[in-house]
Image: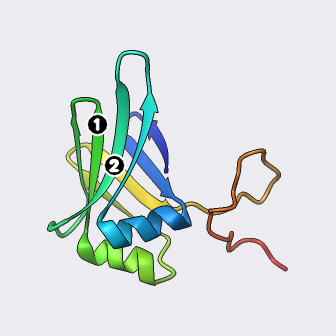
């Protein structure tokens, strides 16, 4: 899972296996190991109607409703956006880059902008 944070905006992009895991277990987690403690970011399936966000003890938790999780898993829906307090949230599928990159993209979704 990739995270991008800019001011009051949080964007999370999930690979195919992470979307599958979210659908099967209701949770997907990533972490960055700093020297003193890890920074954790997690998406959880919740009983809420929309997106929610919290930050507690160096962990960002984004909550998605069960309907949103089902739609991400079972349809061509790219993602969801919303707001939790002052924080804008975007959760979306991670597509393969069109340009050349050194990053492993084998688990990314096929880019819909590529034409064969």
From the viewer's side, name the closer residue of 35 and 79.
35
In the picture as drawn, the residue positioned furthest to the left comes out as 47
Q: Residue 59 carries which label?
A: 1
Q: Would you say 47 lies left or right of 109 here?
A: left
44 w.r.t. 53: above or below:
below
Q: What element carries label 1?
A: strand
For the question of whether residue 8 can be seen, the reply is no
- Residues at circles 2 and 1 in contact by the CB criterion of under 8 Å: yes
**Which image quadrant is residue 10 in?**
top left
Task: Name which residue lies at 25% across and 73% down.
Answer: 66
The picture places residue 1, in percent across and down from the top left corner, at 49, 51
Q: Badge 2 local density, few (<14 within 10 Å), some, or many (20+)?
A: some
- Label 2 sits on a secondary structure element that is strand
x then y, percent, for residue 106: 69, 61
Earlier sequence position, callout 2 versus callout 1: 2
Q: Residue 71 carries which label?
A: none
Disc 1 residue crowd, few under 14, some 14–19, many 20+, Cα 10 Å: some
């Amino acid at each position: 899972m990739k995270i991008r944070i800019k001011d009051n905006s949080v964007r999370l992009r999930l690979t195919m296996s992470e979307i599958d895991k979210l659908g099967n277990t209701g949770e997907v987690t990533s972490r960055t190991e700093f020297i003193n403690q890890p920074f954790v970011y997690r998406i959880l399936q919740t009983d809420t109607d929309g997106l929610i966000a919290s930050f507690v003890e160096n962990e960002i938790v984004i909550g998605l409703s069960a309907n949103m999780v089902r739609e991400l898993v079972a349809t061509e829906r790219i993602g969801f956006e919303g707001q939790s307090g002052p924080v804008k949230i975007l959760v979306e599928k991670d597509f393969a880059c069109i340009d050349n990159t050194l990053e492993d993209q084998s688990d990314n979704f096929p880019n819909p902008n590529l034409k064969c």
